[in-house]
Amino acid sequence: QLVQSGAEVKKPGASVKVSCKASGYTFTSYGVSWVRQAPGQGLEWMGWISAYNGNTNYAQKFQGRVTMTTDTSTSTAYMEVKSLRSDDTAVYYCARDLNYGSGSYFYYMDVWGKGTTVTVSS
Amino acid sequence: QSALTQPPSVSGSPGQSVTISCTGTSSDVGSYNRVSWYQQTPGTAPKLMIYEVSNRPSGVPARFSGSKSGNTASLTISGLQAEDEADYYCISYTSGSTYVFGTGTKVTVL
């Protein structure tokens, strides 16, 4: 399972770091994708990190403002968003990605965290 | 990368079949058999329903099926049940080594 950190309230311009702790599987055999959902809106893929080698791919929209990392010693993935704006208010999900990097055969997300609500408001 | 195009809503009576389309481009849906489908009910995380175009994870009812032709993937729910009322999203891996979601479809059981 994937257990995410708790809800956050931030002011515009601040940063937020969301954690996603994995258990019940070999963390380094998979990747982690991050997906967000603004209130009343659809799902938006933000980026992916390989827990195998730390490689990342970000959606162009988030390049330079989002950083994804992992700590293999604790089987935890992190996503930091900088320079928060009001339109970053959303539920942020982490998901186990069968894509772990070069040589992967499968590309989809099968296990999801329950989501972390991030509210950006002055 | 633009979102894949899905119809905003589809509806059907119990027992009927409904099909949701997911139209992309030759850089995503048309490039690979790496399309999956997720079901989401209000306040919950998405649930995997179909992966690699047409494969069902264990525990997903057989009435859910997927297919693809060219740049368009489809999810069909045969024998619609009340519990199938939810939002459905497709997602595709892309030639840029990223993913792109569909716009989402609300399924209503009449």
Image (spheres, coloured by chain):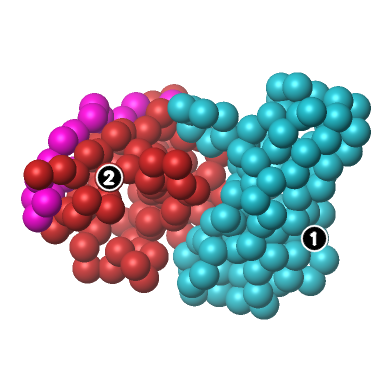
Q: Quadrant of residue B30?
A: bottom right
Q: Quadrant of residue A5?
A: top left
Left or right of A104, for residue B65: right
Left or right of A65, for residue B28: right
Look at label 1 and name its amino acid.
Lys
Q: Chain of mark 1?
A: B
Of the pair B49 and A54, the residue shown nearer to us: B49
Q: Which mark is residue B68?
A: 1
Compared with A46, A97 (above or below) is above
**Residue A7 pos. (x, y %):** 23, 30
Secondary element at tag 1: strand
Q: Residue at x 64, y 33 (%)?
A: B86
Compared with B76, A1 (above or below) is above
**Residue B78 pos. (x, y %):** 87, 35
Q: Which numbered disc, 1 or 2, marks the residue closer to the eye?
A: 2
Question: In this structure image, what is the colour of chain B?
Answer: cyan
Of the pair B31 and A51, the residue shown nearer to us: B31
Q: Chain of mark 2?
A: A
Residue A46 in sight from this viewpoint: yes
Question: In this structure image, what is the colour of chain A?
Answer: red
Packing grade of label 1 (10 A; few <14, some 14-19, many >=20) is some
Secondary element at tag 2: loop
Of the pair A17 and A9, the residue shown nearer to us: A9
Look at label 2 and name its amino acid.
Thr
Left or right of B49, for residue A36: left
Q: Which mark is residue A89?
A: 2
Left or right of B93, for residue A8: left
**Residue B8 pos. (x, y %):** 65, 51
Q: Which stretch did the figure color magenta?
A: A1-17
